[in-house]
Image (spheres, rainbow, N blue to C red):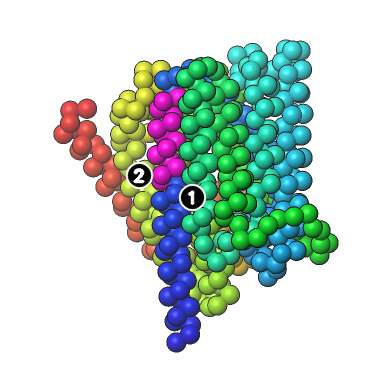
Amino acid sequence: MQKKNNRATLRSRVFQASTWTVGGHFTGQVLRLASNLIMTRLLVPEMFGVMAVVTVIMNGLSSLSQTGIDQCIVNSERGAERTFLNTAWVVQAGRGMLIGLAVVLVALALYFAGASHWLPAGSVYADPLLPAVLAVSSLSVVIAGFRSTYATALYRQVHVGKNTLTELAGTVVGLLAMIVWAVYDRSIWALAVGGIAAEIVRTWLSHAWVAEGKNRFEWDAAAFAEILHFGKWIFVATIFFYLSSQSDRLLLGGLISAGELGVYAIAFFLAAALQQIVGAISTKVIFPALREVHNADTARLGAVYYRVRQYIDLAAYATAGLLFSSGDLLVRLLYDDRYTEAGWMLKILSLSLLGVGFRTVDQCLLALGHVRWISILTATQGVALVIMIPLAFHLAGLEGAIWAIALSFIPNVLLSWWFMQRLGMLHMVLELWLLAIFPLAYLLGIGLRQLLGL
């Protein structure tokens, strides 16, 4: 009876957490879309291209110093202790400051490389605004390093409501700051200021409203050792995850102009919306839930994993089919003629959604303690992108590169199946039966186009 009650309690918490996460990210995406529509009418595409590279560089430096603090707090038996949380906060803050310093150094390097004409002419990296915007944007990662670790500890009980509202509050303030600045000064600084304002609000609220304790300077050598031990494979996995999720813009920044990358950034923004929601659910809901299931009854882990997957796959395959048939119409409806080229890009990128459900494999492996396998999985897609994008661009230009980006998930899927087979958890019928949703959604999209004469 007790086990049944625990299952019901977990199911209830997972449902509530999923509702909060999906609702929060859906609301956030709606707000970002609204802001994006406003900003694309106030700013030129080149500015979005430069800002895409700024984001990629900052994320890359963050990956190089990743210690898996959030996951360690959720996973550790000491994750609710004051001493452990304070030590984690000190490590997190120090990491943020080091990343900020590294971003400034990269900005200086880009400035001197540009002045010496060492960068590809006409590429985003040669844009004279990039070093200054990069240096100023470094403030956001420094500020984020001071977020409360007590707020992170709420994920241990699969409680995400307050953290979700904090993220939304930061998004709203950041978007308002961005729009107000752009109305008075139509420059790229509006995008940089928005990001900094968002992090100030999120960090302040994490201490003032979300946290159930106050962080202060405290150091525990055993806690620090545990964080480092847990983070060693997270560090490797994060670097490769960076390559798999960011190397498209990192590489394209050296191959195409800022204007072309700005248009691509719009297509990527629309295609990645669902992926971001799934990513948030995976880390904030699915991992804590699978960890709890594994601790209570490992035999149920596979069944719970596939139950989660079926909902994600249903949404992903349906969205992919509709966008593959009508992505160009969506772009024409939302944006002006300067962004028309994003339409065909979005149609191709929609195929990447077919691999979205496999992001939950990482959380299943993490719950089982197979962190090394996660590193191998993320490395596979990252390496595939690094090889395929330049090769495809050389053979077929920008369109070829985008096809490579869209299909880069395939090696990852095959390797995921192999790992799941080794664990005795692979069920191919459950993996494949929802794939029929994709052609049905595609035909629905084509039918709507015919009906509307588009």
Quarter of the view holding residue 341: top left
Q: Is residue 215 left or right of residue 41?
A: right
The residues colored magenta run: 26-39
Query: Where is 377 relative to 101, above or below?
Result: below
Q: Residue at x 51, y 36 (%)?
A: 173
Q: Is residue 86 left or right of residue 450?
A: right
Quarter of the view holding residue 130: top right
Q: Is residue 417 left or right of residue 53?
A: left
Q: Residue at x 68, y 34 (%)?
A: 139
Marks 2/1: CA–CA distance? 26 Å
Residue at the farthest front position: 208
Circle 2 is placed at which residue position? 319
Under circle 1, the secondary element is helix
28 is within the stretch colored magenta? yes
Q: Position of residue 387 (x, y in %)?
A: 61, 36
Q: From the image, which quarter does the C terminus lie in?
A: top left
What crowding class fits label 1: few (fewer than 14 Cα within 10 Å), some (14-19), or many (20 or more)? Answer: some
Q: From the image, which quarter does the N terminus lie in?
A: bottom left
Amino acid on which the number 1 mark rests in the picture:
Leu
| 224 vs 250, nearest the viewer | 224
- Looking at the rendered image, the disc whose residue lies closer to the viewer, 2 or 1, is 1
Amino acid on which the number 2 mark rests in the picture:
Thr
Q: Residue at x 32, y 25 (%)?
A: 332
254 is within the stretch colored magenta? no
Any mark on residue 165, and which?
Answer: 1
Q: Position of residue 126 (x, y in %)?
A: 65, 17
| 66 vs 397, nearest the viewer | 66
